[in-house]
Image (cartoon, rainbow, N blue to C red):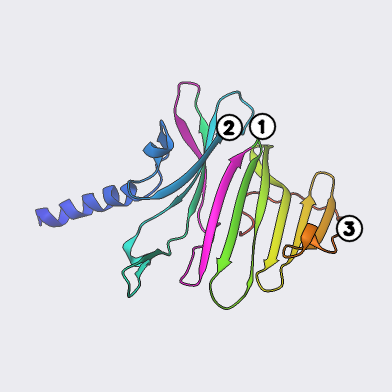
Amino acid sequence: MRNYFFLLLLVPVLAAAQNLNERGASAEALVPQGWEHKEATGDLNKDGIEDLAVIATPNFKENIKVRDDGYEINMNAPQLAIYFGQPAGGFKLFRKYPGLIPARDEFCTVDASLEVTDRGTLRIGVSMFHTAGTADTGGSTYTFRFQNGDFFLIGKDDMEFSRMSGKATEVSENYITWKRQVKTYNMFEKDGGNQQESWTRLKRRPLQRLGEISF
């Protein structure tokens, strides 16, 4: 019976050890051991203190597939979290965003990136590369700004590219000026081939919060 109660006490401890911590002095202190992670720092909430954004990929064994050649494919979905710097030092969790970034699979590699710009905006990039099923590849970069107590999407840049034809399309949308730019060109031709560019006006709408959209 004592062993049973000991296990009941141990389960929450083990679960906590497998989640991003809510406070810590660095990304290494916030991310569980064995998880791969990327980080970006900068003043996101304009209080003069450095903040931290983290994308961490768990290593839960049930979501790791081992190929016949022994290569391991980590199909755990990356987790995004944002921490605000504290006046006394260290970082405190602002919010976690589970399920926002897709997991990779056997035939599609997903790469996520983070950047805090000089203006304090957060840029999250997600690109995909397919090894089967399609010759198209590409990615999107989302720009968020902290205002009114939350992060809001103020811009999005998409890029699509065909590995067969070389045709590429770039679409940039600005949700501050409400303008949309579209560029088309061919990456296999000299100087981009027959390049074209167009601008249109976007219909104004409420800004989306980080977490309201899926990448």
Residue identifier under label 2: 42
* Residue kind at label 3, given as amino acid type: Ser
- Sequence-wise, the earlier of marks 1 and 2 is 2
The alpha-carbon separation of the residues under discs 3 and 2 comes to 34 Å
Q: Position of residue 175 (x, y in %)?
A: 79, 48
> Which residue is pictured at 61% across the width and 76% down the height?
134
Earlier-in-chain disc, 1 versus 3: 1
Rendered residue at 54%/32% (across/down)? 51
Which of these two is toward me, 80 or 132?
Answer: 132
Q: Which mark is residue 198?
A: 3
Q: In whole angstroms, how far apart are the C-alphas of marks 1 and 2?
A: 8 Å
Looking at the image, do the residues carrying marks 1 and 3 touch, with CB atoms under 8 Å apart? no
- Residue range in magenta is 87-116
Q: Amino acid at mark 2?
A: Gly
Q: Which residue is mark 1?
A: 118
In contact (CB < 8 Å): disc 1 and disc 2? yes
Percent x, y for residue 180?
83, 54
Element at badge 2? strand
Badge 2: how crowded within 10 Å, few (<14), some, or many (20+)? Answer: many
